[in-house]
Amino acid sequence: MPARATHRVRPPIRKAPFVVLTIFVLVWVAGVATGEPQRVLEQAWQVCLSCIGIG
Amino acid sequence: MELIRKWVQLIAAVVMNGSWSFPFTRTLYQGPLKVICAPGLNCYSCPAATTYCPLGSIQQLMGSLRFSLENGQYYLGLFVVGSIGILGGLFGRMICGWACPFGFIQELLHKLPTRKFGVPRVLRYAKYGFLAFFVVLLPLLLVDEFGTGHPWFCKFVCPAGTLEAGIPMLLLQPNLRNTAGLLFLNKLVIMVVFIIWSIFASRPFCRTTCPLGAFYALFKKVRLVKLHLDPAKCTNCKACHHVCPMGVKFNESPDDAECITCLACMNRACKFDAISLEIGGLPLGHGETRLPAPSTTK
C-alpha cells in the first residue's frame, strides 16, 4: 500500500472582482472627465434644507 | 477582533465628521475634502461632515439631470457611481460593518440591555425598492415646473440626515426653527422609530431600508474581500447562525447579500476553522489549502 501523500494546491484567484473594479474605475474616470467632481463639491458645500427635512 | 472593529468604526465616524469648527462658523465645512465619497451613510449637510454622501449626491444629480443636459453638461452621476462601485467592488457590505457611522450608532443602541427581537426576513427586500425608487427613479422622473426633481430619500426618509444634520442645524441656526414643519416632523418620527427599533433589533435600518447597503449588496459574489466557507470543515452545527447581527445563516448561504463581514461568525462562533477571510480567492493567514493527493499504484 503506498503512503497517502498530501500536496499543496493554491486556490484559484477570482477574476470577477478585478473585472468589476476595472469597470467602475473607468466609470469614475468618465465622471471626472465630464467635470462632475466640481458639481458634487458645489452641492456638498451647500446646506440642502429640504434634504434634511427643514423648509 | 470585535474591539478592533469598534475602533475602526469610531475612527471612520470621526474622520467622516472631522470638521469641528462648526460651533464658531455655524455652517458646514466647505473645504476640498468634500469631493471625497463617504463610504458609509453620513449626511453631507452634517455641520461636521468632511466628505460627501453618495446617496445625497446621486439624488441631486438625478434631480437636476434635465437641467444639466439642456445646458450641455453631462452630469450623469458617473463620478459618484464610480466611487461607490470601486468601494463595493473592493469591500461590498463590509463597509456597513466597519465604516458606516449610522450602522455604528445602531450597534451601540443595540447594546442597551433589553429583550431582543429579530427582523422579518421579507423586509430585507424593501431596501432595494428604496434604492430604485427613492434614490433614482422618483428624483429623475417626478419633476417640478422648473424641471427639477427632489431628493426623495433624503427629504422624506433618511434618519441619518435628521440625526446628523437636521437637528444640529436647528440648534446652530435658531432662525431655521420656524421653517421646521410637517416634513421635519415626519422625518423626526422615522428617526425615533429606527432608534427605538435599534434597541430591540440588530441594525434594523441596514437590513430593511438603507439604499447604500442595497447597492453594496449587489457585489455579494464579486467583491474582492469576503468570507469563505470551507464545506469540508463545516459540521453544520449552526453556531454561526446565533452570532450574526444581520440574521445570516452563513453555512447555508456564504454569499448572502446581508453579510457585513463583521467576522463574528469566524471569530466567535466557528470552532472548526471552516470560515476564513479571503482576498480575491486567496485565504488570509493561510494562503494554501491542503488537499489529499491522488493515490498512485505502480
Image: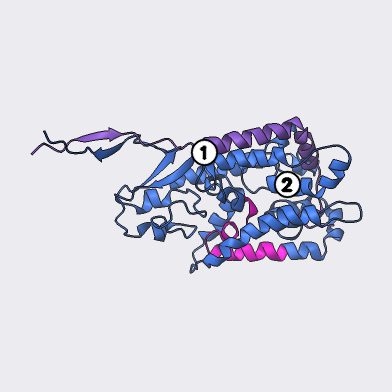
Chain colours: A purple, B blue
Query: Label 1 amino acid?
Result: Pro
User: What is the C-alpha distance between the residues marked 1 and 2?
Assistant: 24 Å
SS at mark 1 in the image: helix
Magenta residue check for B210:
yes
Q: Position of residue B16 (x, y in %)?
A: 64, 41
| Horizontal side, residue B12 vs residue B235: left or right | right
Q: Which mark is residue B58?
A: 2
Q: Can you say whether B35 is above or below B184 in the image?
A: above
The reply to whether the magenta stretch includes residue B109 is: no
Which residues lie in the magenta part?
B188-212
Of B298 and B227, nearer the camera is B298
Question: Residue B265: x and y, percent?
Answer: 40, 52
Q: Is residue B277 left or right of residue A26?
A: left
- Amino acid bearing label 2: Ile
Q: Label 1: how many residues lie within 10 Å, few (<14), some (14-19) or many (20+)?
A: many
Q: Residue sitting at 44 percent across and 57 percent down?
A: B244
Tell which of B114 and B74 is nearer to you: B74
The residue labelled by disc 1 is: A17
